[in-house]
Amino acid sequence: MADKAWGGRFSQATDQRVERFTESISFDARLAPFDIQGSKAHATMLSEVGLITDDERATIYKTLDEIGQEIAAGQFEYRIELEDIHMHIERELTNRTGDVGRKLHTGRSRNDQVSTDVKLFLRHAIDQLIDLLEDLQEAFVERCERDAELVLPAYTHLQRAQPVMANHYWLAWCEKFERDRQRLVDCRRRTNSCPLGAAALAGTSLPINRQRTAELLGFEAVSANSLDISSDRDFLIEFVSDLAIIAVHLSSWAEEWILWFTTEFNFISIPDAFTTGSSIMPQKRNPDVLELIRGKSARVIAANQHLLTLAKSLPLAYNRDLQEDKIPVFDAYDTVTACLELAAAIVESAELNVDRINSRLEEGFLDATTLMEYLIKKGVPMRTGHETVGSLVSLCEKENVRLAELSLEKFQDACPSIEQDVYEILGVRNAIKAFVSEGSGGPGRVAEQVAIWKKRIDERS
């Protein structure tokens, strides 16, 4: 039992099936740099309060750096009987330094050590994801210049509804991913309190300085309650919840572009580098990357449910169940990271099929709502205007014409308030110019938002 941190209490060796069942090194090895970072800060604090000497601190630092370099180079051996990355590093430190290494765990438990390592990982992960979200936003904003004059049909219920500038679509995604970015910023703020020094659950009688450790690790505060620290996984649940929302947004974007890529829509061309073929149908070009972005959202959503279910009935304080928290966190993080990297590349390189879009732009009576609002401006009650335009659309369908092709006489038969100026707002390009409300999809308002987003992107650079 000498390899066990808790072996002094036990006289019988652990069953090999238990060793395999309880190990976490197979997935928590990636925490190694954060474990070393936390241990170095802990050693500095211990030396400053007199619990170890400066020479011992220097030895610990030097040896931890050597171990970290070996791990990074793939030269470090992992053994399941050492359970996790924390014990691997501590055991190797002790093997190389003897009693000096044995002193490192003074004033801490694996409970607060693990929580600290995971929070350090999470801060790094959040920073990486924020960068990737900003890259994706930048890719959408950069499209705005080349798509500036293009009008697209916007949909509700997958039915053509009203026209908007193409850039209105791109900035809609920027807004969604901005909320995602802000949620991660908020999550980072709540994550950024230091658990180290809470020990197992009740703190310690040793004269440690938790504020100093927090300062050394760049935490903004010290976590306040040792019982809470040992049991808290809110920060992981919040993080993965944020990732699930990002995944849903990515899935929705991917679904839209999958539709646009079909022969039926044919709105967009995606480079060969981001599509695949069929093993039997030689003509096929499939949007498999987009389909997998859509599909992988299920893993991230499931990770969120995994964590919520894991934490829902645990009494205070620590329970071994919480070892299972890292698997969904790592998988959700890796999945969303990969999806964001590919999404930015696809957004940057895809091209809208302008001729195809323009050839069908007048289909679907996209100017009908603008005609109704024209009637409102003429003093017609909204509901009456709605009914009137509905009857005019029905007439157009029977005669196989567009609203702009109806004679003034037929307009006035439907509503005497209609005058010659009606033709100034009919047709998609006239209709879209009429949009003036803040946040609308008309040229003027969209240009304002493009300028705001360009400035925002420039300020981040």
Image (cartoon, rainbow, N blue to C red):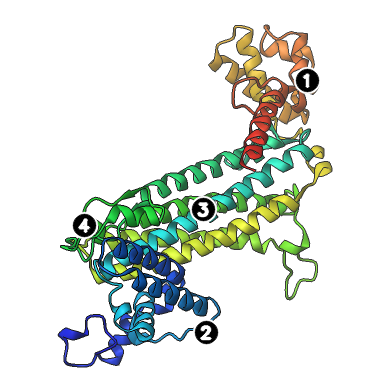
Q: Where 437 sits versus 143, above or below?
A: above
Given contact means CB atoms under 8 Å apart, are the residues at marks 3 and 2 in contact? Answer: no
Please tell me how crowded label 2 is: few (under 14), some (14-19), or many (20+) other residues with Cα within 10 Å: few
Position of residue 56 measured from the top left corner of the image (x, y, whole percent): 34, 73
Which label sits on residue 127? 3
Q: Residue at x 43, y 77 (%)?
A: 63
Q: Earlier in the sequence, mark 4 or mark 2?
A: 2
Which residue is labeled 2 in the image? 75
Q: Quadrant of residue 35?
A: bottom left
- Of badges 1 and 3, the one in the foreground is 3
Badge 3 element? helix
Q: Earlier in the sequence, mark 3 or mark 2?
A: 2
Q: CA distance from mark 4 to mark 2?
A: 36 Å
Q: Earlier in the sequence, mark 2 or mark 1?
A: 2
Tell me the amino acid under the disc marked 1. Leu
Q: CA distance from mark 1 to mark 3?
A: 57 Å
Which residue is labeled 1 in the image? 406
Which residue is labeled 4 in the image? 226
Badge 1 element? loop
Please tell me how crowded label 3 is: few (under 14), some (14-19), or many (20+) other residues with Cα within 10 Å: some
